[in-house]
Image (tube, rainbow, N blue to C red):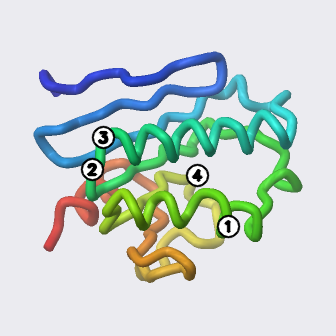
Amino acid sequence: MPDSKNVYEDEWGEIIDRPSIGLVELRWFDTTAPMSKEQFQKWLSTFADQVASVRRQRVLVDATSFLVNPAFMDGPWRDVNIIPRYNAAGVRRFAFHMPAAMPMVGKPPAPEAPGQFPTGYFASRREALGWLMGD
């Protein structure tokens, strides 16, 4: 996409702003396996900062190469420290591109409190983008 701009990148992933389609995207790298819980939480905070900065209504997280220890995914911490920032930034749809075997893939997108937007889990980028761009 010609107007896409890489707004942040490090060894763990990259954040891409796609203004022509009102989307901000996070692509996790397969180098995330050694991340600590603190590094993961710092990265989520960095991503929330970028979402707030670009103020796109659509968010896509490509987690197909995400290898962080699942024990580090602290839902209550995320609900308090990250989700309110997405709400304040005006996010309207949030999609995860996940490995097909993930349990949430294929379920209808729905709000996940305290998020004020529906979240969908998709086995393909095409499906995720189709839903994100839909009405």
User: What is the spatial separation of the Cα atoms under label 2 and label 4, in whole angstroms?
Assistant: 25 Å
Marking on residue 80:
1
Disc 1 element: helix
Residue type beneath disc 1: Val
Mark 4 vs mark 3: which is more N-terminal? Answer: 3
| Residue 132 position by quadrant | bottom left
Mark 1 vs mark 3: which is more N-terminal? Answer: 3
Residue type beneath disc 3: Val
Please report the residue visible at 29 percent of the width from the left and 48 percent of the height from the top: 55
Quadrant where the C terminus sits is: bottom left
User: What is the spatial separation of the Cα atoms under label 2 and label 1, in whole angstroms?
Assistant: 21 Å
- Residue receiving disc 3: 54
- Residue receiving disc 4: 99
The answer to whether the residue labelled 2 contacts the one labelled 3, judged by CB atoms less than 8 Å apart, is: yes
The answer to whether the residue labelled 2 contacts the one labelled 1, judged by CB atoms less than 8 Å apart, is: no
Disc 4 element: loop
- Image spot of residue 26 (x, y percent): 47, 38
